[in-house]
Amino acid sequence: MASSPARYSRSIDWVTVLIYALMLGLGWLSVYAASYSPDAPAGGLFSGQSFAELMQYNWFKQILWIGTALVLIVVLLVVDYKAYDTFAFVLYGAMIMLLIITPFIARPIAGSRSWLELGPVRLQPAEFAKFITALAVSRYMASINLRYQNFRDQLVLAGLTLLPPLLIIAANETGQALVFAAFLLAYFREGMSPLILIILAAAGVILILALLVPKVWLIGAFTLILVGVFAFNTKVLRHHLPVALSVWAVVIGMVFGVDFFFNQVLQPHQRKRIEVLINPSADPLGVGWNVTQSKIAIGSGGLVGKGFLQGTQTKFDFVPEQSTDFIFCTVGEEWGWLGTTVVIILFMALLGRVLYVAERQKSVFGRTYGYCVASVIFFHFAINIGMTIGLAPVVGIPLPLFSYGGSSLWSFTTLLFILLAIDAYRKQDLVR
Amino acid sequence: MQYLEDRKYVVHAIFLVVALVFGVRLFYIQVLDGSYKLAADRNTLQRLVQVPYRGLIYDRNGQILVQNTPVYDLMVVPREVKQLDSARFCQLLQLPLEELRTALKTARAYSRVKASPLVQNLSTPELAAIQDNLIDFPGFSIKARMARSYRTENMAHALGYVGAITPAFLEKPKYAKYQPGDNLGITGLESYYEQKLMGRRGVQYRMVNVRGIEKGAFRNGEFDTLSVAGQDLHTSIDIELQKYGELLMAGKRGSIVALDPKTGEILALVSAPLYDPSILSGKGMGNRYMELLNNPERPLFNRPLMATYPPGSVFKLVNELVALQMGVVTPETGFDCNWKLVRCTHRHEPPRNLSIAIKNSCNPYFYQVMRASVLRGRSTNKFEDARLGLAEWRRQVMSFGLGNKLGVDMASEKKGLIPSPEFYDKLRGYHHWNFKTVYSLSIGQGEIGITGLQMANVMATIANRGYYYTPHFVRGIGQGGPLPEYTQRHITTVDQQHFEALIPGMCAVVDGGRGATGSNASLARYGIAVAGKTGTVQNPHGDDHATFAAFAPADDPKIAIAVFIENAGFGGSSAAPMAALLMEKYLRGKVNNPRWENWLIGPGTERFIVRH
């Protein structure tokens, strides 16, 4: 493995690193703006404040998290790339053990027992479950052929994917558990039937529609469409009647299942988050408050924003959780539409680059892992920004590289740089 | 596996679609939809309105009539109220416990973090009781604001009153600058000069956080404006004269208007029944207002401006002036006191000339004067002749400011009635009336109505020998003079020489010796010649109304006055002495006439002057 550091450095994908650095910088500025208070302007690093005093500012702690993340990057790149492949299942097993014991040893914080305290540092094992699970499923994916493989392999893969989120749900961190749905995109790339994605999308649409319009209309409209299709093409009817009937039955079942799912499966606070999505005034002082104030903060930014540190909605605490889950509000209010567009373009650039890197991997393991990385980041991006502008339910997951917090920063850094480490040795793979 | 590799485009497409949806949605809420910016301002911007000091009101000698004094409200911020000892609190304020609970509930419903009034207009003992103990009641505070207070018990009708703006007012564009709870002048001068008195409101924009706590000025106060104090009103009212007039009118119904003919300034304006202006201010104002409103005597009715009566004999002067101008009579013209035409007031010497006729207020004489000025043979049709004659007569009469609003600086003025040919056409039918129908106008009776102010203005016009200035209350606004329209002369259609011819007769009314109808108004003992005219207005509803209109001194008039006392009978016996007392008061500064004072100032204010 011993290639010169210079050669190694040349083989790192610097485009990804650059995008990562840009996002980290903008993210820190946003955290600074969100934790800035016009009453007590944080003096800054050179104001003579003691370390303990500085530690009460999120922006200062974020500097520490970024610093440690840089150390982490060095470690990740130095470790032999083969270790990620080799130890994937070992790591996975250790992580499962950690997830199992976490609820028993963690103190409850904000209703969930998912944070481990190591001295001054608080870690959320669920964050690290993402990259470890990604490694494990990629490793398993490399050993099977999803498209033609038998049912048992698919079941094992499903089990590998579903075990961590189930344990996370048990610790009451539903938001983090939902992220694992993103792996489906990676499986799709490796040959999973598109039907699963379509059915899931359809289920989501039906869920929303069932909440918006009376069920009778929904069923009526769907039946009319089916009847219409077959009336125009009787040949299709003859060949596919059983399929059509079963689709029809499934849809009817889903429509009526919505009520059951909504009232029996979802917990009251989860139900409320979906209700608020449809009608923001449903819970004006609870979750509705978050969504409404978040939209006001972003919407009041205008085209170019109010200027750095000039936001009023974020400064005066109208937006809750503004340095973590609602960090996008600070961007929207202070930098306007131009700022939000830049952030979206940066995410698109990062995701595009990760997919590009993934596609150039020669191993199924590397490619699958790359797709997992892109999918997980995309899921966070879509849900987090979606919830701040009222397009997605309020799910407490951070905006990658922007939100304040060590666990999430380390988690995404690890996710990304393991891919870069694998990618850097791609040529050696070829040579061997 | 080209087939699977193509799936990367699907993944790309999913990413891009979501990004595109976000971009469009963000463009919509950030750039296109302005409502979020408004909502953000509603969240954080607090508009603090600074209500300026309302202008003061002075009398013509610089005495303050209306001023501002602080009143105190007890405010509460519900969130900050902690462990309220309600028993002690209620005991201090003499407030029933139930009322406190309701008030606190209302305050909480308004806002938990913003101050709202718990008890308004604290009385001095209440203020003293609570102020020292406020420290024991966190969340409560005292807020001072300015309210109107009165340094006079008089002049209520002219001053008007100030009250909280009503929702109906707030909807009008004119009152766009006002907010609920703001005060404004509602009647009288307070209302007419509202824009001058109120000054300019200052607005400060403050930013508040989610808990309503202040976070400093918005954009360093770029949009803040300072308040500008209201301008003072310097009225022409002589408050001593006003006070004396109200003393004389107490217990009666009627009006007094005194003008300075040289300027049109109103020296006194009395409307009886009277009330104290301070009744319509402070705690319990609403109840007292309703009491005044529902009083059968209608004390809120501003009689000198709003009550129109037939002027009675005083109007003979106007008729004569019009006839002289038309050239149909001369001052030497004599007529019979022919009782067949119209009953006369009393038996008197033959009206050989104008002066004798005025002195005796001879009804048949002025019947014939008006017949001469209306029926002039303009048409062979006697009906048409009366129509044309009345039209010309009316045109000249209206040049005295009659039949139209004079334009006084008060909103409630009525225009009165000087009938036109069309008026009688409507009443009787076209060509179905002639002079016989309208003859009572010749003695100021019938289908004619003028206000007390108009009658005083006629006196001022005669005193000026042909012109008048629009009567007005305010001679100075802030550092400036009166409104420009009050410095313009209004010239009548009648030439000066005819006025000169009329005045000796008016002097004879007062000082003409035996048979003079207005001798009770004489100030001859002070060497002051009074020119006046009595009037007795027939009243179908009860006793006749007494009027007397005059000006003095006759050769250099300083005051013109019209007194109107309802149901007091003959004008010479009550209205004339009252006018005399007021003119004496104004011209000499004091009154030495116990006879008339004892006669007019009753022992109880409820006493009405009865028919003589």
Image (cartoon, coloured by chain):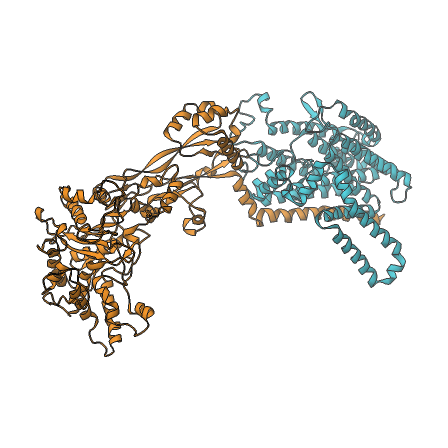
Residue drawn at (61%, 49%) of the image: B28
Depth order, front residue of A346/A1: A346
Residue B154: x %, y % from top left: 27, 42
A346 w.r.t. B319: above or below:
above
Residue B44: x %, y % from top left: 52, 38
Asked whether the viewer can see residue B570, the reply is yes
Where residue A292 sits, quadrant-wise, is top right
Residue drawn at (82%, 36%) of the image: A161
From the viewer's perspective, tell me whether residue A133 is left or right of residue A401: right
From the viewer's perspective, tell me whether residue B34 is left or right of residue B588: right
Depth order, front residue of A162/B545: B545
Depth order, front residue of B121/A248: B121
Residue B215: x %, y % from top left: 49, 33
How many tags in the picture? 0
Residue drawn at (77%, 44%) of the image: A258
> Which chain is drawn using cyan?
A
From the viewer's perspective, tell me whether residue B362 is left or right of residue B472: left
Residue pushed farthest bottom?
B380
Residue B103: x %, y % from top left: 49, 34
Q: Colour of chain B?
A: orange
From the viewer's perspective, tell me whether residue A116 is left or right of residue B508: right
Asked whether the viewer can see residue A303, the reply is no
